[in-house]
Image (tube, helix red, strand yellow):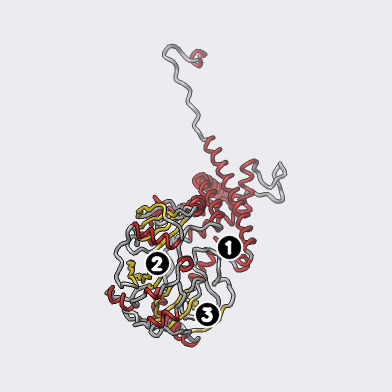
Amino acid sequence: MPRSSLLSWKRAKRWMYWVHRWTGIALCVLFAVWFVSGVVMMYVPFPSFRADERVAVAKPIDWSQVRHGPQEVLERLGAATAPGEMRLEMTGGEPFYRIALGDEQHAFSASSGEEVHGVSQQRAMEIAEEMTGAPAESVTPVDHDQWVVTRAYARIAPFWRVRMADGAGTDIYVTQKTGEVVQNTNRTERFWNWLGAVPHWIYFEALRVYQEPWRQVVIWTSGIGIVGSILGVWLGLLRVRLKRRYASGSTSPYRGWMKWHHIAGLIGGVFVITWVFSGWLSMSPFGGLPSGDSVAKRYAGEPALRFAPVDMARLAVSAEGAREVRFVHIAGAPVILAVDGDGRKRALDGVTAAPATPSLAAIADNAGAAVRDGMLVTAQTLTEYDAYWYATGDPRRDARPLPVLRLIFDDPHATWLHIDPATGELLGQTDSGRRGYRWLFSALHSFDLPVLLKHRWLRDSLMIVLSIAGLIVSVSGVVVGWRYLRRRKPTPRPKAASPAGPGPAAAET
């Protein structure tokens, strides 16, 4: 190698060592926290109150109290556009229509037909008690706290936080405007989340309430961590000697904590990089993927501003025992989905309320109208999970039911639609970008591969072992970095000569 190239290479290595050292000193504590908290999150996710849990804890609809149909309440709302969501459910012993119109949430009593414009503290207690079966202990008004801090909650704030006397320290969050229950937590969840999701996502309320600053903090810390990790693996490989070993007989030139850092980094370094990279990618550093709302809207069709007049007497019979009734449009036609306590859905005609199971041909025609720039090339019914339609066991995600119909198109985005064959409901859509993201984030970060999801113990064991390797890398890096910083302390200067007389050095001269 020419001398100039050798000097350049040495200079580059010095810079790599310098960058790796200081990024490690800055971030190794955070990395250690990430590995420990990631294991906690495998078993205790962030609190949520998604559709599955909402339906599971709901009471069956009391049809004797339902005196007004969906078209009536929409007429009273006087909206200029069709609602994005409309459902009927029981709240505090009374049936209510829940309507989402843009960022606005509305609630109408199905008994009186009147809109709810506010919920008192006493009423919030009654709603929480009816849902949990336990007496309320206290009620606190909150705009946001650690568990209702995202933009989605900000749109529906403020809340009544009702603490239940159930022995579990359960908190029920009821919106002050509409009386809807939107979140629940208990003492155990909150404790473990302070060791899990909160530090893992840097999800502290004081920062998380500001969406973009929080996002930038996560992007920059994980981005810098990626650079430091890549340099660490590269430098670690350069220091390994497999054939001509060091004088100690070891493949590593280091001892003590530095050797632990070197060896553990070589074993788990690749996984450290992929975990940090996939976490960084989840923050959409280059912008988010297309939402796909246009396909979903075309699949729903062009609904009327008002839902069709429904035969409510027939609906009460057809939807008997349902915990929730959803009013949707498919191909422009009104459809009612009656949801049982186990999440099973029944499709009913939006006018007659008679059972309505769509044909495969009708589903294919509707899907073809939604994906305008491509042709349907494959239609398959999945009866078991695969790499793109799977269940993780994470209660934060709504269950992906089986069987499901997968329709594959040859459009420029390579669109796939997943549709419930029993109801015709569009359950999900994916394109080439989302499928790539599935591997770059989900597979790398959560190891949610089909074979590992079938054998949860194998997946958990693998993630825990690799997390321990990452923890060793991080803790050893903290120790090494601390010792380096201590060595860099400036040595005190010699004391100046005393005015009373010369110091020892002066006397010698």
Foreground pick, 297 / 329: 329
Residue appearing at x 30%, y 69% in the figure: 115
- Which sits earlier in the primary sequence, circle 1 or circle 3? 3
Q: What's the residue type where badge 1 is placed?
A: Phe
Report the Cα–Cα distance between label 1 and label 2.
43 Å
Asked whether the residues under the numbered discs 1 and 3 touch, taking CB atoms below 8 Å apart as contact, a structural biologist would say no
**Hey, what amino acid is under mark 3?**
Leu
Q: Which residue is mark 1?
A: 447
Query: Which residue carries the number 2 mark?
Result: 93
Residue 66 appears in view: yes
Position of residue 4 measured from the top left corner of the image (x, y, whole percent): 55, 49
Q: Give neighbour class at mark 1: few <14, some 14-19, many 20+ (Cα, 10 Å).
A: some
Is the residue marked by circle 2 packed among few (<14), some (14-19), or many (20+) residues within 10 Å?
A: some
Q: Which mark is first along the chain, 2 or 1? A: 2
Horizontal relation, residue 78 to residue 322: left or right: left
Could you tell me how far apart the alpha carbons at marks 1 and 3 are, in whole angstroms? 25 Å
> Regarding mark 2 in the picture, which secondary structure is present there?
loop
Identify the residue under disc 3.
405
The amino acid at mark 2 is Gly
Q: Secondary structure at mark 3?
A: strand
Say which residue appears at 37% left-offset and 59% top-offset.
124
- Tell me if mark 3 has few (under 14), some (14-19) or many (20+) residues whose alpha carbon lies within 10 angstroms of its own: many
Tag count in the figure?
Answer: 3
Placement of 366 over or under 64, stated as above or below: below
Of residue 251 and residue 385, the one placed in the foreground of this image is: 385
Given residues 484 and 451, the one toward you in this image is 451
Which of the two marks, 3 or 2, is nearer to us in this view? Answer: 2
Q: Which mark is residue 474?
A: none
Question: Where is residue 373 drawn, in percent x and y?
Answer: 43, 82
